[in-house]
Image (spheres, helix red, strand yellow):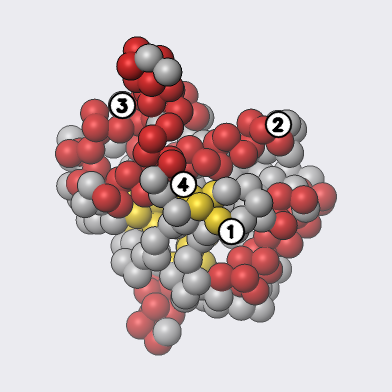
Amino acid sequence: MTEKTLNYFEWQFWASYAMRHEKVGPWQLPTVRPCYTMPKGVTGFDQLRPKTPKDLFVHWHSWDNEFETIWRNPQKHLRRLQEFSGIFMPDFSQFSDFDFPLCLWNLRRNRLLGNWYWENDVEVMPCATWWDEYSLEHCLDGLPRRSLIEVSNVNTCHTPESERIFEMGLNKVRDVLDPLAIILYGKRLKRPFDGPPILFFQNSHYTGNGCSYLNEEQLQLIKET
């Protein structure tokens, strides 16, 4: 392989970076480190402004094209992200409407980017994502146990079937990862959850100021936990 060819694949696929990371399971997913820093509030990467409070976590729950640049050039926004309390692991989309290779490609990208930012002094909260029953067999491979774990139901619970799959995923996260708490971004659950505390952040695109915070009841729950 020529140097030109090698550089092309490195730029497109992070080839050598992926090869030197520990991977587990039949899908060879990169492992992810735990996070113990509880977000006070969150804001979207596409909502960052000069006056955005820096004591927030940054999330990626918007259209993928809003943050595709971090895959092509993660250094471009590194210094900016280092100013915040942390970030959720990037979330390139995985939907049941996508074919499996596309979902797996985006899942791989999310893991690699999360590791890269962690290695470059950014606090990264692991995110659990799944898209159908089959994906639940291995999509949690490599995620840490006894950590804070973020999940999102933005654009995923529009039908009874999609709600069922989301609830199955939550139960799988509980049983496999035994998280300290689950950070839910998007919409509140319709039914009680038998598991660790679920701390809810409203979709920051609908809050008016681009930020979403825990309410007093949830802050008290954190103290008690």
* Residue pointed to by mark 2: 98
Question: Percent x, y for residue 220?
Answer: 38, 80
- Secondary element under disc 4, as helix, strand or loop, is helix
Q: Is residue 64 above or below residue 157?
A: above
Closer to the camera, 143 or 214?
Answer: 143
Give whichever of discs 2 and 1 has the lower sequence position: 2
- Secondary element under disc 2, as helix, strand or loop, is loop
Q: What label sits on residue 117 in the rendered view? A: none
Per the model, the C-alpha gap separating discs 4 and 1 is 11 Å
* Residue pointed to by mark 3: 73
Which residue is at 63% across, 37% downward?
Answer: 103
Give whichever of discs 4 and 2 has the lower sequence position: 2
- Dot 1 amino acid type: Asp
Q: Is residue 187 above or below residue 116?
A: below
Per the model, the C-alpha gap separating discs 2 and 1 is 20 Å
How packed is label 2: few (under 14 Cα within 10 Å), some, or many (20 or more)? few
Q: Residue furthest front?
A: 1
* Residue pointed to by mark 4: 111
- Dot 4 amino acid type: Arg
Per the model, the C-alpha gap separating discs 4 and 2 is 19 Å
- Dot 2 amino acid type: Phe
Give whichever of discs 1 and 3 has the lower sequence position: 3
Judged left or right of residue 215, residue 161 is: right
How packed is label 4: few (under 14 Cα within 10 Å), some, or many (20 or more)? many
Q: What label sits on residue 141 in the rendered view? A: 1
